[in-house]
Image: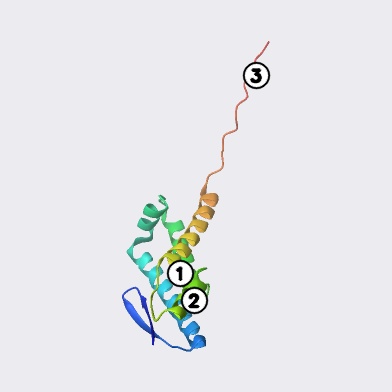
Amino acid sequence: MKTIKVGRELYPLPDNPDELETRMVEIVHTYRSELIQFLIATGLDLYLAIRFSKRIGSQPLSDLKRSLVGLANSHQLPEEFADILKAVNKYDYYVLPSAPFYKQIDDRLQRNLVQTEISFKAPLKRTPRINVLAY
């Protein structure tokens, strides 16, 4: 019987490849959702300050939280899911790495931070002065 360790939890996995893939998708979605909930609960603003060296206001922070909740509820799998599934098929015991999930979260945050910076930058209100020399 196959076993996967996710965080502090151990999950038994079925030996049938079709059931295994379905169970792995459930585990991946649950784990990503738990990571995002933990990140929001412990302070997304602190994570942004440490990870991206950014401090943002309450409204953009709320938008980022909403975007992460959308990621937690989405069916989008990490890019490395196929590699994870191959490793689970190969070994009887596998420890699920958290790096692909944090990469997916960071990509989402980075994309939204760029959009936030673009929409919140104030346009230049002053017109440049042209000095004319009188001859």
Q: How is the image coloured?
A: rainbow
Label 3 SS:
loop
User: Would you call the spot at circle 3 few (<14 residues within 10 Å), some (14-19), or many (20 or more)?
Assistant: few
Q: Residue furthest top?
A: 135
User: Marks 2 and 1: which is nearer the front?
Assistant: 2
Mark 2 or mark 1: which comes first in sequence? 1
Q: CA distance from mark 2 to mark 3?
A: 72 Å
Q: Say which residue label 1 marks.
A: 69
Locate residue 83, reporting x and y percent.
Answer: 49, 72
Amino acid on which the number 3 mark rests in the picture:
Val
Q: Nearer the viewer, residue 61 or 97?
A: 97
Q: At x 35% / y 61%, what residue is drawn?
A: 43
Residue 51, placed above or below residue 70 = above
Amino acid on which the number 1 mark rests in the picture:
Val
Q: Nearer the viewer, residue 49 or 128?
A: 49
- Numbered mark located on residue 86 in the image: 2
User: Marks 3 and 1: which is nearer the front?
Assistant: 1
- Numbered mark located on residue 132 in the image: 3
